[in-house]
Image (cartoon, rainbow, N blue to C red):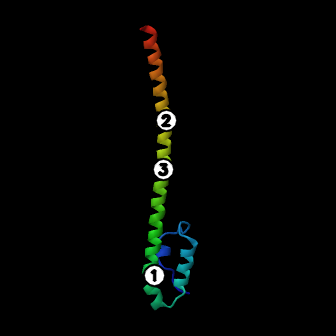
C-alpha cells in the first residue's frame, strides 16, 4: 500500500476535513507514484485551504457571538439610561 500524503498526516485531527476530501486523499494514495506526485501538491493546497476556511469561520462565529452579547449589554445600558433620564426629569419637574 502507498504511503499517506503529507497533507493528511501533518495533523492527527482529520475531523475538520470533509469526508469527500479524505476520500479523494485515499484515492490519490492508491494511484501510481508518478500520478500521485503530480496530484499531492494540489491535495495539500485543498486541505490547507479547507483548514484555513474552517479557522476563519470559527473566528467569525466567535466574533458574532461576542457582538450579540455586546448588543445585549448595550440595549440593557440604554434602557437603564433612559429610566434614569426619565427619573431625573420627573424630579426636576416636581421641584420647579
Residue 16's place in the image compared with 45, above or below, is above
Q: Please name the residue that numbered disc 3 is placed on.
A: 64
Q: Residues within 10 Å of mark 1 (few under 14, many from 20)?
A: some
Residue found at x 44% / y 69%: 49
Q: Name the residue under label 2.
A: 75
Badge 2: residue crowd in 10 Å (few <14, some 14–19, many ≥20): few
10, 90: nearer the viewer: 90
Mark 1 or mark 3: which is in front? 3
Q: Point out residue 60 in the picture as x, y percentages from the top left corner.
A: 46, 55
The answer to whether marks 2 and 1 mark residues whose Cβ atoms lie closer than 8 Å is no
Q: Which of marks 3 and 2 is in front?
A: 2
Q: In this picture, is 35 found above or below 88?
A: below
Helix, strand or loop for disc 3:
helix
Task: Tell me which residue sits at (42%, 13%) in the image.
Answer: 92
Q: Residues within 10 Å of mark 3 (few under 14, many from 20)?
A: few
Q: Compute the Cα span from label 3 to label 2.
A: 16 Å
Chain-order first, disc 1 or disc 3: 1
Q: Mark 1 or mark 2, which is nearer the start of the sequence?
A: 1
Figure check: 53 above or below 6 = above
Q: Residue 40 carries which label?
A: 1
Do labels 3 and 2 touch, CB within 8 Å?
Answer: no
Q: Residue at x 45, y 84 (%)?
A: 39
Q: How far apart are marks 2 and 1 (CA)?
A: 52 Å
Instruction: Give the image location of residue 38, x and y in percent.
Output: 43, 86
- The total of numbered circles placed on residues is 3
Q: Which residue is drawn at 52% across and 84% down?
A: 29
Q: Position of residue 70 (x, y in %)?
A: 47, 41
Residue 12: percent from left, percent from top: 52, 69
Q: Check disc 2 and report its element: helix, strand or loop.
A: helix
Label 1, label 3: how far apart the Cα atoms are? 36 Å
Q: Quadrant of the N terminus?
A: bottom right
Residue sitting at the far top: 95
Amino acid at each position: 500500500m502507498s504511503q499517506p500524503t503529507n497533507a493528511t498526516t501533518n495533523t492527527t485531527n482529520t475531523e475538520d476535513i470533509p469526508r469527500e476530501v479524505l476520500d479523494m486523499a485515499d484515492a490519490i494514495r492508491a494511484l501510481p507514484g508518478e500520478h500521485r506526485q503530480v496530484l499531492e501538491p494540489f491535495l495539500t493546497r485543498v486541505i490547507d485551504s479547507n483548514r484555513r476556511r474552517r479557522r476563519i469561520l470559527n473566528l467569525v462565529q466567535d466574533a458574532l457571538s461576542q457582538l450579540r452579547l455586546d448588543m445585549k449589554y448595550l440595549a440593557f445600558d440604554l434602557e437603564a439610561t433612559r429610566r434614569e433620564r426619565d427619573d431625573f426629569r420627573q424630579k426636576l419637574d416636581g421641584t420647579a
